[in-house]
Amino acid sequence: MNRRKALQQLGALALLAGSAGLALGQAEEEGGFRVLKSAVPTNSAGKIEVLEFFHYACPHCRDFEPLIEEWAKRLPKDVALAQVPMIWGKPLEELARLHYALSVMKRLDLHGKIFTDLQDRKLPLDKPEGVREWAEANRLNVTAFMDVYNSFGVNTQVQRARQLAGLYGIDSVPTIAVGGRFLTSPSMAGNSHEAALRIADSLIERIRKGK
């Protein structure tokens, strides 16, 4: 899903268009993937960093999620996968905050449930009061969770997510970044989720061999 479609998808959430900050949106196109003209420094010492850019209001990301989850289980030990929420406007910022709060609380088992609760049940998870009610309904310690949700640490991670999207020039989701050098996505891979993951595997191997 590209930025324009994301804004349309989030119309019911009163999305205000925000800056995507696409600082390095230039990349050379190859078969099913892009080669970044300027490599992005990675943050996984000794491992190949793989990032999946997504957002919870994106139906394509929701469809991709079960495949990503299974793929992650098969990744070699020298690969570090992280999911990075895209931030286009205030509602997506709040959803990113929810994601990172769950990460800090070690409750990313609820990650997939957010897609359903937002897209099907139309819960207002882009608003703090909606998040509070959701946390209570999911039997989280609401006070502790909201403290983390509003914490400096989560603020820092949200800002880092925004920065990463700009550095990689991400203009649609879901998109996978490999080793700070390559991008692939279902749309680049012939609109195939499975093909995108196969390409990601080949890019990981390319990084491993220093190519």
Image (tube, rainbow, N blue to C red):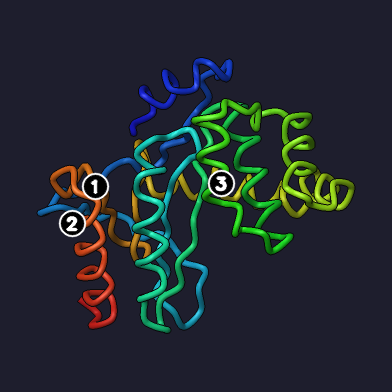
Badge 1 or badge 3: first in the primary sequence: 3
**149 shown above or below 71:** above
Distance, label 2 to label 3, CA atoms, is 25 Å
- Disc number placed over residue 113 in the picture, else none: 3
Percent x, y of residue 175: 34, 48
**Quick check: 165 left or right of 29?**
right
Badge 2 or badge 1: first in the primary sequence: 1
Among the 4 quarters of the image, the one containing residue 137: top right
Distance, label 2 to label 1, CA atoms, is 7 Å
Find numbered disc 1 in the image and state the secondary structure of the residue it sits on: loop
Along the viewing direction, whichever of 66 and 126 lies nearer the viewer:
66
Along the viewing direction, whichever of 130 and 44 lies nearer the viewer:
130
Percent x, y of residue 5: 36, 24
Residue at the extreme right of the image, as rendered: 143
Query: Is the C terminus in the top left, top right, bottom left or bottom right quadrant?
Result: bottom left
The three-letter code of the residue at mark 3 reads Lys
Badge 2 or badge 3: first in the primary sequence: 3
Along the viewing direction, whichever of 173 and 27 lies nearer the viewer:
173
Q: Are marks 2 and 1 in contact (CB under 8 Å)?
A: yes
The three-letter code of the residue at mark 1 reads Pro
Mark 3: few, some, or many residues within 10 Å (few <14, many ≥20)? few
- Disc number placed over residue 195 in the picture, else none: 2
Give the residue at x 23% y 68%.
203
